[in-house]
Structures are given as structure tokens and as C-alpha cells.
Amino acid sequence: MRNKRLLIIFGILLSLTLLIAVGSAIFSVKTVNAYCYNADDQELVERVEELKDKLAGKSIFMLNEEEIIAQIEGEIGGIKVVNIERLFPNRVSINFVKLFDYFEVNYDGSYYVCGIDGKILRRQEQSGGNSVIKIKLNLDQEPVVGGTFASAERFSTLQDIITMLEQLNFRDTNAPALIASIDLAYSSTAIYVKTRAGVLIKLVHDDNAGEKLRKALSLYTAKPEYRTSGMIIAVNTDEVFYSPDSDTIYEESNL
């Protein structure tokens, strides 16, 4: 009787061992593909796929997506991973978007280029010109590529504005074609948004800055006659109006 029990236990353990061995072979990552949602950039796709060594051989059930995303974004600048997709039994797809040049901050003679998410993509010696939005911030330390401008005054206000631009789907070249600069350094009580058409947008105070900008841009879109001169002023989210007179002092200080 005792021997029979031992044989049953041994059989169960053997079955479990075989099951684990077979499962490990079947569900180990063998193929890693990458897909870019917003650009036909084969070189960038291949660079992402080159990181397959970080996943190959690992159990598809045990992948730590947050850790993998942090590693990929840390090693390859200019992308944002949307998700890590498990394709059973042994394939993984890394889905990402390419971060285009969107913002630019001048610090100590160098230009720090950011994507739509505010992440610093690179440092360069020449401005991107009209292809990017100039952001003016008061910085207390040198920016770091791969980081953000989190140490800057009013960074949370800039985040609020970026979030609104994302919600309005102003990705890629749309917003830079409309907005020339966003100035959070000139005044502590107002944000100045200079459009390329000519009208100046003034957001009074930092609260609900993103929503104020949305209302101001709605007026800009609805009234073509307001676009080339004067000033659109957003006092709050309900009080947005046009003035034919611009902020002369600000304009003269930024010639």
C-alpha cells in the first residue's frame, strides 16, 4: 500500500516536471517584432527589434511590461512604447509611436528638443526654427537628455498645456504650424502664446491653463479675422475675448 502511494506521488511529480519542461519550451519567447503606429521608419523598427535579447527565452507569462518599456525607452530615444503585446504561445510585439520634434527649450546657448510628451529627445547647437514650438522657461539647472524639465518653474502648467494639445490631437507638425512660442518665463501672472499667423494669446494666471488655451484656440478657429493681429485673452475658462490691441510691452520685449 505504501509503495503504491509512493508510486502515485512519484508519478504526479514526474508529470508536473514534464509539464513544466514542456510549458517552458512552448511558452518561452522566441520571436520579437516591433510596430510603429505613426511612421514608416524601418530603421527605427529594426533598432527596437534588436532589443529582443532582453526578452528571448523568458516565459511569456512572466514578462514585466513596465520594466521592459522603461528599458526600451531608456536605450532608444525618440519613441514612446504603447504596449507589449503577448502573442501566444511564444511571440511578442512591441508597439510604439515615434516622438517627433515638438518643443524646443534654449538653455545656455544649446537647444533641447522635446517630443509631445515633454521628454527631452536630444541636445543640439542650432534651433529647429519654425518646425518646433519655442518654450520659454525659467530653469535652475541644466536639462538632461532623456529627462524632462521637471525642475523648471511652472512645469505643471506646461504639462497641463501639453495634455490639452494631445487631447486636441495636435501631434506631429500640427501644433508647431499653428503656435510659434509659449512663454512661461516673462510673467508670473500670465502665459503668452504667440501664433504663427500673428495674433497673441494671453492666458491669465496658471489655473486651468490647458482649458483656457483650448477656448482661446476655439475662438481663433471660429473667427479668421482674429488671427493676424491683436490679442485673444482668456481670463478664465468662461471669459475669453478678442482685443484688436496686443500687449505692446510684451511684444516690444520679444522683438
Image: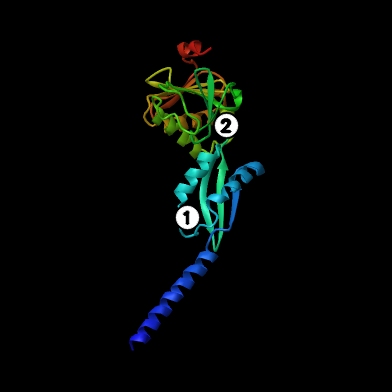
Q: Which residue is mark 2?
A: 101
Residue drawn at point x = 53 percent, y = 57 percent: 57
Residue 59, percent across and down?
Answer: 49, 59
> Can you see residue 36?
no
Q: Is residue 150 above or below residue 74?
A: above
Callout 1 environment at 10 Å: few (<14), some (14 to 19), or many (20+)? some
Q: Which residue is mark 1?
A: 63
Residue drawn at point x = 37 percent, y = 20 percent: 189
Q: Please state which of residues 218 and 32 is positioned toward the viewer in this rendering.
A: 32
What's the amino acid at mark 1? Leu
**Image colouring:** rainbow
Q: CA distance from mark 2 to mark 1?
A: 31 Å
> Can you see residue 239?
yes
Residue drawn at point x = 51 percent, y = 57 percent: 58
Residue 150's quadrant in the figure? top left
**Residue lying farthest to the front in this orientation:** 3
Residue 89's quadrant in the figure? bottom right
Residue 11, percent across and down?
Answer: 43, 79
Residue 155, percent across and down?
Answer: 41, 29
Q: Is residue 24 above or below residue 255?
A: below
What's the amino acid at mark 2? Asp
Q: Is residue 104 above or below residue 66?
A: above
Asked which secondary structure carries label 2, the reply is: loop
Residue 55, percent across and down?
Answer: 53, 53
Using the image, tell me which numbered label, if any, was put on residue 24.
Answer: none
Residue drawn at point x = 55 percent, y = 37 percent: 77
- The mark nearer the N terminus, 2 or 1, is 1
Quarter of the image with the N terminus in it? bottom left
**Residue lying farthest to the left in this orientation:** 2
Q: Is residue 57 left or right of residue 207?
A: right
